[in-house]
Amino acid sequence: MIRTAQTGILTTSAGGDVVLRRVLVRVVTGTSRGKEALLEAGTLVVGSHAETDLVVAERTVSRFHVELSLLADGVRVRDLDSRNGTFVGDSRIESAIVQPPFEITVGRTRIELVPADLPAPEAAPELTRFGPLVGRSAAMRTAFGVLESAAALEAPVLLEGEAGTGKSAAARALHEGSGRASGPFVVFDPTAPQAPLDAAVERAAGGTLAIDRLEAIGGSAAQQLVSVLDRRERGELDFRPIGLSRIDLRQRVQDGALRRDLYFHIAAVRVVLPPLRERREDLPVLVAELADRLGHSGLGLGDDELAPLRHHAFAGNVRELAHLVERSLAETMAPARPSAPPLEDGLADMPFKEAKEQLVDAFERRYVASLLDRHDGNVSRAAQEAGLDRNYLARLARKHGLR
């Protein structure tokens, strides 16, 4: 755990800053007026009994009247079968989630809930790696900082990003960097046919449960997941949830397509992994990293050599880049085709500059050939799809004998 002078739930504020979420609970009417308690972790019980966390010695307040639970984006207010009820506004409630600043009424006593957030410990600003994820762009350094801080905590984490941005790798790295690293890491897809949540939770005991495809969950599956997460919050189940979504779940909540309480359960810390097209400055380090994983350490590409990649759409993000690098390396290492310069030795045995040239030539030839083939040789349509200048694509085609 990260040790600070204060405690609280690590989360992200409306402005995107990482904060320690805390709430001040203060009595504002009656003979107990001015009494207060700090809700900074777990739950806080309000009542007239001396053993409650906030004692309100009022005749209309039950001994154990209401329980307040701290969530990432609010406070769950749960009436404990009190005699005179708990009210949010004019409505008597059994359970509700409120967003501080807010006021509730227990019996005839009004109690206010006031935000008392604190800045979270700052992560190293130059962090360029988290587990297998790499990047030097500002967006990735920010994400890595939040992930590193979150790894040391027990807070649920929501990872959002398009397909191929690295959510699964980030989830596993969070697990491996946590105090649960020696426990199991279980991936659960609630949209898969015959996916038993209870079995997944049982396998994840003592470890981490990564819940994939949250954007598609609904109906009874969502209800069951909320019930399980609620039991975990009460300490009945022992696992850390990490949610994965390809889209912004806040919009799904606003549209009424996702249960608000499910979002609150899972989004204690929200991290967005940006698409590759929004961090093209990371291409050199990504290509070098991917080549290194394939056994070609030291390979790197310059700006001119990266030009085709910089204009690529990358609908599949880093996963698509990995496939491109892998195919290009495999082609470069294969026996030479008649149209390609012969390779007498393996790529790893060649001088650095020559190896780079072979890699770039192989990639350009394969990419341009595939692109032109899809468009029956029409350079204009091919250039439009690839986001390239028509003349530049034509020069590449001539360079490799494709026109």
Image (cartoon, helix red, strand yellow):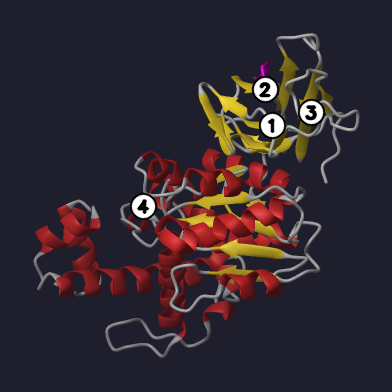
> Which numbered dot is residue 177?
none
**Residue at 16% from the left image edge and 55% from the top image edge:** 384
Query: Residue beneath label 2, please?
Result: 107
Q: Are marks 1 and 3 in contact (CB under 8 Å)?
A: no
Q: Which residue is mark 1?
A: 83
Q: Position of residue 155 (x, y in %)?
A: 70, 47
Return the disc, 1 or 3, that comes first in the chain's sequence. Answer: 3
Give the Cα distance between marks 2 and 1. Answer: 8 Å
Q: Nearer the viewer, residue 55 or 325?
A: 55
- Spatial CA distance of label 1 from label 3 is 11 Å
Q: Give the spatial CA distance, label 4 vs label 3.
A: 62 Å
Gap in Å between the C-alphas at discs 2 and 4? 64 Å
The quadrant where residue 299 appears: bottom right
Q: Nearer the viewer, mark 1 or mark 4?
A: 1
Q: Does residue 321 show up?
A: yes
- Secondary structure at numbered mark 4: helix
Q: Which residue is mark 3?
A: 47
Quarter of the image for residue 378 reads bottom left
Q: Residues within 10 Å of mark 1 (few under 14, many from 20)?
A: some
When asked about the image quadrant of residue 334, the answer is bottom left
Expressed as whole percent of the image width and height from the top left, the position of residue 11 reads 64, 37
Upstream in sequence: badge 2 or badge 4: 2
Q: In terms of sequence position, does the residue under pointer 1 or pointer 4 come before the other?
A: 1
Label 4, residues with CA under 10 Å away: few <14, some 14-19, many ≥20? some
Asked whether residue 130 is in view, the answer is no
> Which residue is label 4 attached to?
310
Q: Amino acid at mark 3?
A: Gly
Q: Secondary structure at mark 3?
A: strand
* Nearest the eye: 380 or 152: 152
CB within 8 Å, label 2 to label 1: yes
